[in-house]
Amino acid sequence: MPNEKSEKAKKVHAEDIASPKGMRDLMDKEYHEYQGFFEKASEIAIYYGFRPIETPILEREAVFTSSLGIGTDIRDKEMYSLKTKGSDHLVMRPEGTAAIMRAYIEHGMQALPQPVMLYYYGPFFRHENPQRGRLRELHQFGLEILGTPKSIADALVIRSLTLILEEAGFKNLSVELNSIGDKECRGGYIKELTSYYKKHIEKLCLHCKERIKTNPLRLLDCKDIRCQEMKKNAPTPIESLCNDCRHHFKEVIEYLEAMGTPYRINNYLVRGLDYYTRTVFEIIDTSEIVEGGLEPLALASGGRFDYLSKALGSKKDIAGIGGAIGVDRVIMSPSHKPLDPRIIKKPKIYFIQLGFEAKLKSLTVIEILRKARVPIAQSISKDGLGQQLAIAERTGVPFTIIFGQKEALENTVIVRNMETRSQETVKISALPDFVKHLKDELR
């Protein structure tokens, strides 16, 4: 008699195998929306000189623990980490910039003509509470320029990301812009900021009481209503900028104005990761404010990271600027205009097959049509002529190819014009040339 306990253990319920919280399946129309967006984004990136890179989904933990900074949510709470059988500590990548810099150093890209301009796309993972526009598995399209401190690189990244979003249907974009200084002036600002908040420490939320010790810049990023009030009178980074940082920021603004890119200086934007210096930015859809009254989500964000390389073992600083688009937020937005991927072509021919002999040869005929680059539709599992013709009518194709038992024996097909109902018998061997003639007709 089987063990009742072991039998019970074998039962699996649907909820036991459901996709993990904050992660989901992409299928059909939605999958093609993501693919269409990526194709358009990469087309623009390539035009502006960016080259593709894909980093591993799993990275060594130190890539992120050494670069993101103590007191950041990503490092302290959101990383998916694991220990391998060989005792390696790995994480599922939570963001792209540190991994790109790691690849730049590891592959000796310093020896290439500078700057090195790279684009990437893929899934990233953060163990945060799923909410509007935030998922635990998120898709990002990112741009990075490494090896130059020049302000035109900042403007190029911001402008390229804005163009990609415009092509995806967003008509009311604005760049939220700030400068948080560099190692020459940041230290003085942090002291001033910390001193201000310590005077009001009793009024702060619990998280900000901790941030004063670990990551003071993130005090300006807090969404708690108590801390929002404190922020109104807090010193701003721009007030403490050194001459070089002030000049750099002025040039970034001039480039954006010359390109007609709408922007707004946000004195309290800090993008709380340790590796950011000077320029930080977010790109928002201002129509979201008008329509829903909700705080707009950043569709894209980024900044300069001139000191990141040393945190990853480089002997010298490597100036860089980058940003990434949250593709899930783009696809979910009512402002998004879906972009059909190149592989999706409207069918020109509906292929109908009748009988077993025809089924045996049907894939050969379909392959001839594929090589002739004619998009088709088919229901190869159907059998009846009337049923398949009805599907062809609904599909709206201009032609059908009918392949029955007689045609299979004679190595021919019947090509029917769905509008005039005229039809013609064509040898399979002559089908490629005949199809070329059809393609000219269909243009």
Image (cartoon, rainbow, N blue to C red):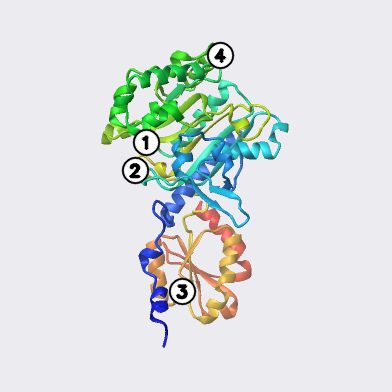
| Mark 1 residue element | loop
Query: Around disc 1, counting alpha carbons within 10 Å, would you say few (fewer than 14), some (14 to 19), or many (20 or more)?
Result: many
- Quadrant of residue 294 within the rendered picture: top left
Residue 34 horizontal/vertical position (percent): 46, 48
Query: Around disc 3, counting alpha carbons within 10 Å, would you say few (fewer than 14), some (14 to 19), or many (20 or more)?
Result: few
Q: Which residue lies under the disc numbered 3?
A: 381
Q: Which residue lies under the disc numbered 4?
A: 244
- Give the CA separation, mark 1 to mark 4: 31 Å
Vertical placement of 189 versus 158: above or below? above
Query: Around disc 2, counting alpha carbons within 10 Å, would you say few (fewer than 14), some (14 to 19), or many (20 or more)?
Result: few
| Mark 2 residue element | loop
In the rendered structure, the answer to whether residue 275 lies left or right of residue 25 reads right
| Mark 3 residue element | loop
Residues under numbered marks 2 and 3 in contact, where contact means CB atoms less than 8 Å apart:
no
Which of pointers 3 and 1 indicates the residue nearer the eye?
1
Q: Nearer the viewer, residue 399 or 69?
A: 69
Residues under numbered marks 3 and 1 in contact, where contact means CB atoms less than 8 Å apart:
no
Which of pointers 3 and 4 indicates the residue nearer the eye?
4
Can the viewer see residue 57? no
Which of pointers 2 and 3 indicates the residue nearer the eye?
2
- Give the CA separation, mark 2 to mark 3: 42 Å
Residue at screen point 55% across, 37% down: 97
Q: Amino acid at mark 3?
A: Ser
Can the viewer see residue 291? yes
Q: Which residue lies under the disc numbered 2?
A: 132
Residues under numbered marks 1 and 2 in contact, where contact means CB atoms less than 8 Å apart:
yes
Residue 233 horizontal/vertical position (percent): 33, 17
Vertical placement of 114 versus 363: above or below? above
Q: Which residue lies under the disc numbered 1?
A: 297
Residues under numbered marks 4 and 2 in contact, where contact means CB atoms less than 8 Å apart:
no
Q: Amino acid at mark 2?
A: Arg
